[in-house]
Amino acid sequence: MAHKKQYPRKAKFFLADIIHIDSNNSKPTLIGFFPGDTVGLNMQKGASEPSDSEPVVIQALSILTAFVDCRGTFDANISLFRPDGKPMFEDKKISTIGTGENPVIMDINFVVQFQPFNVPQIGTYRFVVRLDKKKYEYEFKFQRGIENTNN
C-alpha cells in the first residue's frame, strides 16, 4: 500500500565550514559551526570590498537543511542569491531525496557543500531549497571579520 507523501513540517538550517553525515545513523557532525548565521571574513586592513572580479575565497562552506517530519520522495533543487538579488545559481537540480517507501514519518538531512566558496559581496545571501514545488528559504550573512594587519 502506497503511503501519502508528507512534506516536511518545518526546515531547520545550519551553516558550517564542513558538515559530515554519518552513514550508520544519519547524524550530522558540524565542523566550524556558525550559530549566528554570520561568517566573518578575514580581510587585510584597508582592503576593498569583495567584487565579481576579486571575490574573497573561503576554503569551504556547507549548509545543512534538516527537514522535519516528512514521508516520501522529493526532487530537490537549490538556488543561491547574492545580497544584490542576482543568482549565483538558480533552480539547480541536486538529487532526489526522501524516505522512499518507508511508511514512518521521518527527518531528512540534506547537505550542500561548496569547496571553495567565492564571496563576491558582503551582505545577506538567500539560499532556497525546493522540494518538488515547495520552497524553504534561509538567509545567512558575510561581514568583515578580523582584520589582518600583516603585510
Image: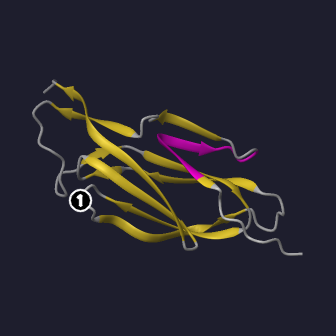
| Residues in magenta, as a range | 11-24
Can you say whether 132 is above or below 67 in the image?
below
Seen at 65% across and 56% down, the residue is 9
Callout 1 amino acid: Asp
Quarter of the rendering containing residue 95: bottom right
Quarter of the rendering containing residue 100: bottom right
Front-most of 4 and 93?
Answer: 4
Front-most of 90 and 151?
Answer: 90
Percent across and percent down for residue 147 are: 20, 28
Percent across and percent down for residue 83 are: 27, 55
The local secondary structure at tag 1 comes to loop
Seen at 90% across and 75% down, the residue is 1
Left/right placement of residue 23 relative to residue 151 reads: right
Q: Is 102 one of the magenta-colored residues?
A: no
Q: Pick the quarter of the image with the C terminus.
A: top left
Seen at 21% across and 35% down, the residue is 43
Dot 1 corresponds to which residue?
Answer: 84
Q: How crowded is mark 1: few (under 14 residues within 10 Å), some or many (20 or more)?
A: few
Percent across and percent down for residue 93 are: 51, 71
Q: Is the magenta stretch mostly helix, strand or loop?
A: strand
